[in-house]
Every structure is written in structure tokens, then in C-alpha cells.
Image (cartoon, rainbow, N blue to C red):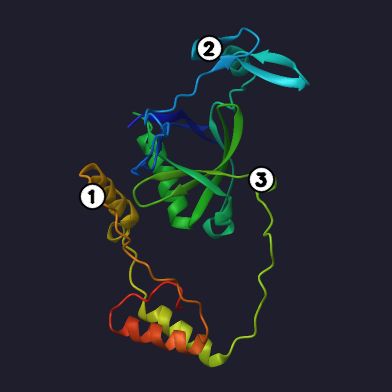
Amino acid sequence: MAVAHRGSISMGLVLIPVGLYKTTVDNDIHFNQLCRESKQRIQYKKYCRHCDKEVTSDDIIKGYEYEKGKYVVMTNEELEKIKTKKDKTIHILQFAKMSEVNMIYYEKDYYAVAEAGAEKAYELLRQSLLSQKKVAIAKTVMGTNEKLLVLYPTKDGIIVKTLFYQDEIMEMPKAVPKMKLDETELKMAKLLIENMTKPFDAAAFHDEYQERLRAAITKKIQGQEIVAVDSGEPSNVIDLMEALQKSLELAGAGKEPRKGTA
């Protein structure tokens, strides 16, 4: 697995060299864009209007537009020069309770893996955080952005979660009205939740649509027609009590309620 970022976790005077690795893999089916007439793949060329020619990646440099049509060029070497030693480390700013970090701030996850010789200091940090149910709030520079991070301890290691800053979070577009609930409806909803509660096992879930998509692609390759698997319309909740009751009956029979009925 390729390392996404390399640096050191800085906790006071303690430095823990780590590599950050992606936590997920993209298994989705991806489509290419084709020309409707020729069925050949569409290609995007990098083109300079001033030179009237196609350019390669080696010909492209970074430029910031400070006035309309005027750019200042920044080389990779110059971008590196303005990084401080602190920017090149994952420097811990403070610690906080796990529950205090709202999940809306989480952006991407990385495995933090200790480099050779740093295992003991890494384990000291992991166990100390886990025993107190706390996380480390840290910063580092990745690319040209200073990232706010959470070092999240697990039983197997430390997950580094990049965070959005406060000014990057959009406000809720519409306030959710706090409706007055009937006590019977609330009891039935709680009972439904209890009946459908069991330990979470990530291996029990998979992308069923991707499986149907793969099967559909295979059929198309074989010259077969794609047939609709479900022509029914999702039902709207008309009578909440009736929908809850039917959902409870299905849950009690070990069946999964249809989407839209509760």
C-alpha cells in the first residue's frame, strides 16, 4: 500500500515518525465517456491558447492570479521553502474527549503506521488516549493546505482524521421542526428500534447495486436486454401508526421493512 503522507507525530518533545496510508479502496465500477457516433473514448487535451499548442504535465507550473490575467508563479521548491519544521510534523495542539468532536467535521481517514524504531512511543500514545477515551487535536501541512487533524485511537492502531475548518461547514439549509409526538407512536418507534438492534458487523453489508450493475454489464456484453428489477413506486407514509405497526410485524418476523414505510 502506497504511503499518502510521511511525517512525525510531535507530542511535546516526543517525535513519533509515521506514515499515513489510505483507509479505503475504490471498488466502484467507473464508466468512460464515449463519442455517441464512433463509440470511441473521449480524451481531454491540455491546451495553451497563447501558444496554440497542446502541453504536457511537464510544461505546467503553478500560478496564482492576483489581478485579472496576471499571475505570480510559485515553484515546488519555493512552496517547500516556506514550510517550517512544525509544518512538516503532525504537531499535537491539545487533547479532547472523543465525544466533543462533532462528526460533521470529519473529512478523510488515514492509517497512522509507526516507522521502525517508533513503535514504543506510538503504542504509548495509543494506549494513553484509548484508556481516557480522548483524541489528539493536531495540525500539519499536506500539499499546500494546513490540515486540522484528529488522532483517533482504536484497539488496532491510530486513525488520523482530517477535519474541515469551521468556516467550511455550511449551515443547515432549513430548520427541522420539532413536532409534538404521540406517546404511543414514540413507544412503538422505540420498540421497532429495539427489535432491529444487533451488533454492527461491517462484513455483513455490501454494495448490492454494484452487483446488479456488474450483472447488467455482463448481460449487455452477451447481447441480452436489461429488464427492470422493480417497477413499484416507493410508498409515502399516510398513517404513521399503521406504518409503525406493519414495520413491527415485519421486524418480528425477521424481515426487513420496505424503505419508505417507517
Query: Element at badge 2?
Result: strand
Q: Residue at x 36, y 29 (%)?
A: 2
Q: Residue at x 28, y 83 (%)?
A: 253
Check disc 2 and report the residue beneath it.
54
Question: What is the crowding at mark 2: few (fewer than 14 residues within 10 Å), some, or many (at least 20)?
Answer: few
- The answer to which of marks 2 and 1 sits earlier in the sequence is 2
| Mark linked to residue 150 | none
In the rendered view, would you say 189 is above or below 150? Answer: below
Query: Element at badge 1?
Result: loop
| Mark linked to residue 168 | 3
Question: Which quadrant of the figure contains the N terminus?
Answer: top left
Which residue sits furthest front? 37
Q: CA distance from mark 2 to mark 1?
A: 42 Å
Left-right relation of 112 to 94: left
In the rendered view, would you say 194 is above or below 140? Answer: below
In the rendered view, would you say 125 is above or below 63? Answer: below
Q: Residue at x 66, y 17 (%)?
A: 63
- Residue 37: x and y in percent read 41, 31
Which amino acid type is marked by label 1?
Gln
- Residue 113: x and y in percent read 38, 36
Which amino acid type is marked by label 2?
Glu
Which residue sits furthest right? 67
Which amino acid type is marked by label 3?
Glu
Check disc 1 and report the residue beneath it.
224
